[in-house]
Amino acid sequence: MRPYDWCMLTAPADSDTWLGLTAEALPVGRAADWAVLERCGAVVVFSGTARDHAEGRDDVERLEYEAYDRYVVPRLEEIAEQMRQRCPVLGRIVLLHRVGVVELGESSVVVAASAPHRPEAFAAARYGIDALKATVPIWKRERWADGESWALEAQHLGKLRG
């Protein structure tokens, strides 16, 4: 069993931060609904979906993700902590990523942030997805009609910046 196979795709009952790595379809709608709090008037949800093209290729058929499992959730925890430090009024945070095959149109990543007002929610969600893409050890393989390639040129992992 791979470590992420046990990752539950249900929101935590005892935390305002929902983090995860899974091979299952991501619960985009549930994540958006869960992020709502009475004290927060804004929820921003980003869902990154598999598309049919990439730079220089118009015939992408599917994506596949692999992760350095043991480091993903700790890195997501760091990102969530940075989001809260940058914006102490945040309500709930969702950072979920998929591994394995992701078909066209399916979500590979979900980031959500709730806050009392939209500027904070937008800024937090933007920081969350940018930090996730730049620092979390998850790699993407693109498959197209005539071949496949790890999209290593698209992501060079860096350190998390506050």
Image (cartoon, rainbow, N blue to C red):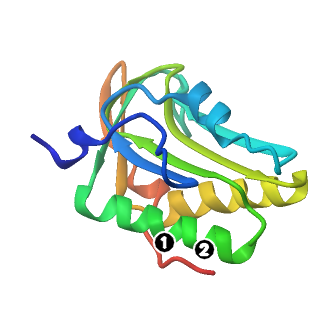
- Residue 99's x, y, as percent? 32, 39
26 w.r.t. 87: above or below = above
Residue lying furthest left: 1
Crowdedness near tag 1: few (<14), some (14–19) or many (≥20) residues, C-alpha within 10 Å: some
Say what amino acid the circle numbered 1 marks.
Glu
Left or right of 89? Residue 47 is: left
81 w.r.t. 115: above or below = below
53 w.r.t. 135: above or below = above
Q: Name the residue under label 2.
A: 82
Could you tell me if the residues under marks 2 and 1 are in contact, i.e. CB atoms within 8 Å?
yes
Secondary structure at badge 1 equals helix
Left or right of 146? Residue 60 is: right
Left or right of 15? Residue 65 is: left
86 w.r.t. 141: above or below = below
- In this view, the residue in front, 127 or 157, is 127
- Residue 10's x, y, as percent? 43, 34
- In this view, the residue in front, 76 or 39, is 39
Crowdedness near tag 2: few (<14), some (14–19) or many (≥20) residues, C-alpha within 10 Å: some
Residue at 70% over, 54% down? 125
- Residue 106's x, y, as percent? 50, 23
Tell me the distance, in whole angstroms, between the alpha carbons under discs 2 and 1. Answer: 6 Å
Q: Mark 1 points at which residue?
A: 78
Figure disc tally: 2
The quadrant in which the C terminus is found is bottom right
